[in-house]
Image (cartoon, grey):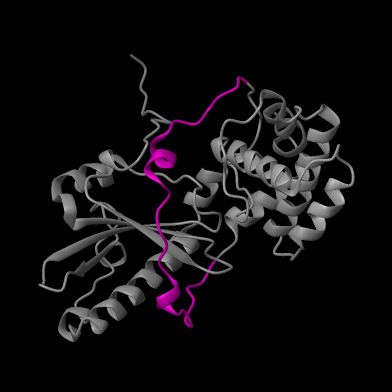
Amino acid sequence: MAEAWARLEVEAAVADYRHMLILELNGQSYNKAAHRRQLMARLQQRSESSVERKHQNISAILRDAGCPYIDGYKPLGNYQVLLADVVAEVILDDPQFDRAATAAAEQPALPRIDMDFRQWTDQPPRPREVREAPVSYGFQPVHRDYLALEARNRSLGLAGEEMVMAYERARLLQLGKPSLSDKVEHVSKARGDGLGYDVLSFERDGRERFIEVKTTAFAKEFPFFMSRRELDFSSQVGDQFHLYRLFEFRREPRMFELHGDMRHRLWLDPVSYRAMVA
């Protein structure tokens, strides 16, 4: 059994991850392999796979805290308390990280006009990873609500919806249904946001497909908001409801799809309540 990581090793791994994450949030390139080699020289004979897992653990902590994480390090749970504490100290409480994450969440966006939709779709996260409640180890980091900041970024949301419009039209044309392609409608723009979905599209047989679009500039498992109206509508229309989750939007947009009643497909956290004095 591998020896537990000492605090100095954990601090070195988290500092290295922080550096790469801020570079990524700022749109700067870096070499993961070079970072890993330099980090391993400071550790006690750790293997590349051990370092990889530690970085994946850091991604899981950031995901559970509602923060952006490095897309190339898929979140891996069951992380140690010490690691969570160091991530809170080194990343979550760091002003430079906060500035970079805030700027990334608020930056305007435009839809890609050169998108090859053959490379567009991806598999959703495994159900276990979607439904599992985030692990809490008791630390209460003070950080900005990046999820809420990005949710208020109307430019990003609109760009995602416009790309879905283009995708749906292309999908129906490929199915040999040009008349249906012409009927695809951006309902959130034409009729308002209160219907419970953003785009009206169609199946091959003409049945309506109701699409709710959720767009993030961050990684695949970054959480998102669902309104009560959206959840209720997904229950009402069942398999006709499709959630398109767009991710890594500013670099290389991709999406995964869920359909049906979202109460059965998502782990839902009641993060806020409407309140009045009793």
Q: Where residue 124 sits: x, y (%)?
A: 40, 53
- Residue at coordinates 78% horizontally, 50% vertically from top-left? 19
Q: Is residue 232 above or below residue 157?
A: above
Q: From which residue to which does the magenta span run?
A: 109-138
Judge by depth and name the residue closer to the eye, 151 or 41: 41
Q: Is residue 132 above or below residue 224?
A: above
Q: Quadrant of residue 160?
A: bottom left
Q: Is residue 241 left or right of residue 38?
A: left
Q: Quadrant of residue 218?
A: bottom right
- Residue at coordinates 79% horizontally, 41% vertically from top-left? 46
Residue 129 forms part of the magenta stretch: yes
On-image quarter of the C terminus: top left
Q: Is residue 110 left or right of residue 35?
A: left
Q: Where residue 204 sits: x, y (%)?
A: 15, 74
Q: Quadrant of residue 86?
A: top right
Name the main secondary structure of what is drawn in magenta: loop
Judge by depth and name the residue closer to the eye, 38 or 237: 38
- Residue at coordinates 57% horizontally, 30% vertically from top-left? 78
Residue 59 forms part of the magenta stretch: no
